[in-house]
Amino acid sequence: MNMKIKNQRAITLIALVITIIILLILAGISIASLTGSGLFAKAGEAKIKTEIANIEEEANLIYSELLISQYINEIDKPEMSNIVSKLIDRGYKIEEVMALSLDKDAISLSINGTATITVKYNGSPDPINYYVVINEEYYKMTLTENAVKVDRNPSEMDKTVTIETLKAESNNTNVTVESINGSVITLKGGTTAGTSTITVTYGSHTATCEINVVVRPTETSEVVEGTTFSTNHGKIDVIWLKDNTKEVVSNPNTPILTSGGESMTPVKWNDSNNIVPTTNTDTNWYNYEENRWANTRTANESYFVWIPRYAYRITYYENETSTTPTGYYDGYGQWKAEDASIRLKLDEGVDTVDYNGEKYIVHPAFDNNVEMGGWSNKLSGFWFAKFEMSGVTGADLKSIYGVESQRGQSIEKQYTNARTATYGYTGTVDLFDNKISYMNSHMTKNSEWGAVAYLTHSRYGRNAQEVTINNLGCYTGGSTGESYKTNVNQSTTGNVYGIYDMSGGGYEYTAAFFLCNGQLSDYSNWSTITGLTVESDSTKYVTKYNNYNIGKIGDGTKEVYTGTRNWFSDSFDLGSYTWTFSLRGGAYDDSQNAGIFYIRVFHNNGSNYDVFRVSLCP
């Protein structure tokens, strides 16, 4: 009996151990199913998504409150930074990560000279980024036209980015980094000419600047006969000038909207790529750092683009892929990089600006030297028609997309129409010759065309890339309707904020008259209409060319001349004929023959291809 009890107890203990083992196995399976990819993980994900949704809802409530305040108090439209500051006040953890850009991507530096480059944290196409931090993961926040959105998936990013990590290094000893003071990096040139690359790093972000150490000309340097070097391609460096002065500023001048008490309406494009009116206090109206130029609409729905006052200098290269400069065109004239020998002196009367160790050219279109294409006074900027002109008379002249541009008009009609265009406004009387117009509307001059072309080929536009041709020459913006929205490569900015029809389109006249060997051709009494004769001088409305072979500084011909053509192999026939007004653009199938710098002296009175463009000077 005792043996039987013992055996039963032994069986019971074995059963208990087996039961415990089974329970442990089942518990392990259950725990595994609740963690990792199981219920615990799913519960955690659900909690994070709920928290994200709560933050998003809170952010949009804040955004709505700020929009109401904007409407009532007539203040600037709220930005993400305004929303983020309130979220932080309410206990949310938000991190700010700033993208990196430099104020210039290439500069020249004298031997043993110094220069600076400035880091711009919110000036790149991808500016300040904001991230909600949840469980040490970063979820990006974005502000669209109508709402705040928070990504549901975490972003991979450098979580340790701070301004103290800003670094700059040179790839050789020809240029050294002297100091980093805040966002300003000071560089020093070596003892010999050469090229260096400065790499700037800010956390995970990088940017580079090409530094060319050169021997420079001096104020007394003279032209060295026989100086030659390649000018086949170039990069144009632009600096903004304040108001109508030579003071260098970081932002372009604010567009002038009002004339004679009547104002144009600022416009922009929303998230659906549709035009919407805005106000001059809207911080999202324009941003030249992001290649979004200021656009405006007149009372008759004409569109114009603001070209702010600037100075420029050009660096030449052998071709588009070369990184070694062959020469420069700046305040010293056109000179060779190798030995600083001057090929062309700067045109007389052109103003210059000394900045950051360089001598820049104040673009003549903004100054008051009418012989060089200037205005009656120094300008803070001017408005340039966004499209080729349509309309039969000055009263119905328009700059609008998706329509046939005006053709078949004689020069005198184009000149008069441009001078008398009011764009739906009452306009004002110009006491000089009793013409009525809005904002001194006039036929675009070569200098103004050149100012647009040079800004286009700076980093604020296409940055030395060729503008795509408008092969459908009779329609503004590249085709009918709203096709300009998809034809952005035909724009000077590569987006809808630029100027169209400057490459291809119609044969586009500009306001310049020519004397070749003392002769001035006369067609259809245009000289009677304009008042221009052989003895006439340039006016603020039209520029005189007298036996010029390669144009004037800033007009989109002289500095970009390659010896046979202009950059991108664009045609160049300036001064070859005894005709009157100059002509730009062209409806060619071959894009090599119709680029943004194209200009030709030509007159074919009343041709079906003769079009024009206007500028407004406030």
Image: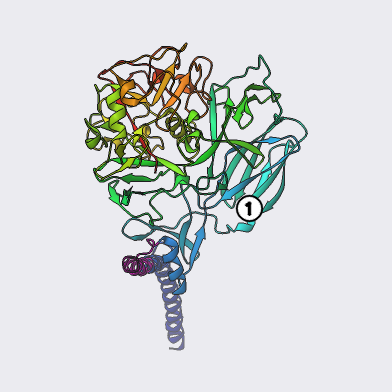
Q: Is residue 198 left or right of residue 32?
A: right
Please say whether residue 538 is visible from this viewpoint: yes
Q: Position of residue 514 (x, y in %)?
A: 43, 18
Magenta span includes 531: no
Snapshot quadrant of residue 485: top left
Question: Looking at the magenta stretch, what is its main secondary structure?
Answer: helix
In the picture, the quarter occupied by the C terminus is top left
Up/down of 69 relative to 187, above or below: below
User: The disc labelled 1 sits on which kind of residue?
Assistant: Leu
Please say whether residue 472 is visible from this viewpoint: no
The residue lying furthest to the right in this view is 191
Q: Which residue is drawn at 66% across and 47% down?
A: 168
Q: Is residue 131 left or right of residue 66?
A: right
Snapshot quadrant of residue 13: bottom left
Q: Which residue is drawn at 46% across and 21% down?
A: 545
For label 1, the residue is 166
Q: Crowding at label 1, few (<14), some or many (≥20) Cα neighbours within 10 Å?
A: many
Q: Position of residue 224 (x, y in %)?
A: 68, 18
- Residues rendered magenta in the picture: 52-78
Kind of element beneath mark 1: loop
Magenta span includes 69: yes
Q: Position of residue 69 (x, y in %)?
A: 34, 69
In the picture, the quarter occupied by the N terminus is bottom left
**Viewer-proximal residue among 429 and 80:** 429
**Viewer-proximal residue among 270 and 156:** 270
Snapshot quadrant of residue 339: top right
